[in-house]
Image (cartoon, rainbow, N blue to C red):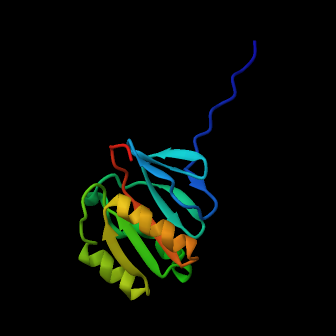
């Protein structure tokens, strides 16, 4: 009798900066891979991100951004289908550490992030997943 190896579930992480190729159906495609759920793209790579809705945005959700603050000048926050403002307490916390934060729809945030990444700017993005195909 052979034993089936145990499946290991790890936190989602792609260890490199990369553009986001597509989004929709509750996830994203990048670097020839796909991820279901929201993502956070910072200088150390792309991470699965816990927030599912705008209401889930909190300073704790941006812990990885604050850990990498020395390599980030601009943070783009994709708020889903609709544009929603960066909550005032988050905007103030980012400003205090020298990060310019801006919110836009997830699609607009992806497009802006990809351009800024190609320009080798110090950019990060936090993207809420959306349910439609793009």
Q: Is residue 68 above or below residue 55?
A: below
Residue depicted at x 72% and y 20%: 3
Q: Quadrant of the N terminus?
A: top right
Residue depicted at x 33% and y 43%: 132
Residue 59, by quadrant, is bottom left
x and y percent of residue 63 in the render?
45, 69
**In the current view of this chain or complex, which residue is farthest to the top?**
1
Residue depicted at x 43% and y 64%: 111
Residue depicted at x 69% and y 23%: 4
Q: Is residue 60 above or below residue 95?
A: above
Q: Say left or right for 29 vs 82.
A: right
x and y percent of residue 28 in the render?
46, 49
Q: Say left or right for 1 vs 54.
A: right
x and y percent of residue 133 in the render?
37, 43
The one nearer the camera, 12 or 22, is 22
Q: How many marks?
A: 0
x and y percent of residue 43 in the render?
58, 70
Q: Is residue 64 visible?
A: no
Q: Is residue 57 above or below residue 99?
A: above
Q: Say left or right for 2 vs 102.
A: right
């Amino acid at each position: 009798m052979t034993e089936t190896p145990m499946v290991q579930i790890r936190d989602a992480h792609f260890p490199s900066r990369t553009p986001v190729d597509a989004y929709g159906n509750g996830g994203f495609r990048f670097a020839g891979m796909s991820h279901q759920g929201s993502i956070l793209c910072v200088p150390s790579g792309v991470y699965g991100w816990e927030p599912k809705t705008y209401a889930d945005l909190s300073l704790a959700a941006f812990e990885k951004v604050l850990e990498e603050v020395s390599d980030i000048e601009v943070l783009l926050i994709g708020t889903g289908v609709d544009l929603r403002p960066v909550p005032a307490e988050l905007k103030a916390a980012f400003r205090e550490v020298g990060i310019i934060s801006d919110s836009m729809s997830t699609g607009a945030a992806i497009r802006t992030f990809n351009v800024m990444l190609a320009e080798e700017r110090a950019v990060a993005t936090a993207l809420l997943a959306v349910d439609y195909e793009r």
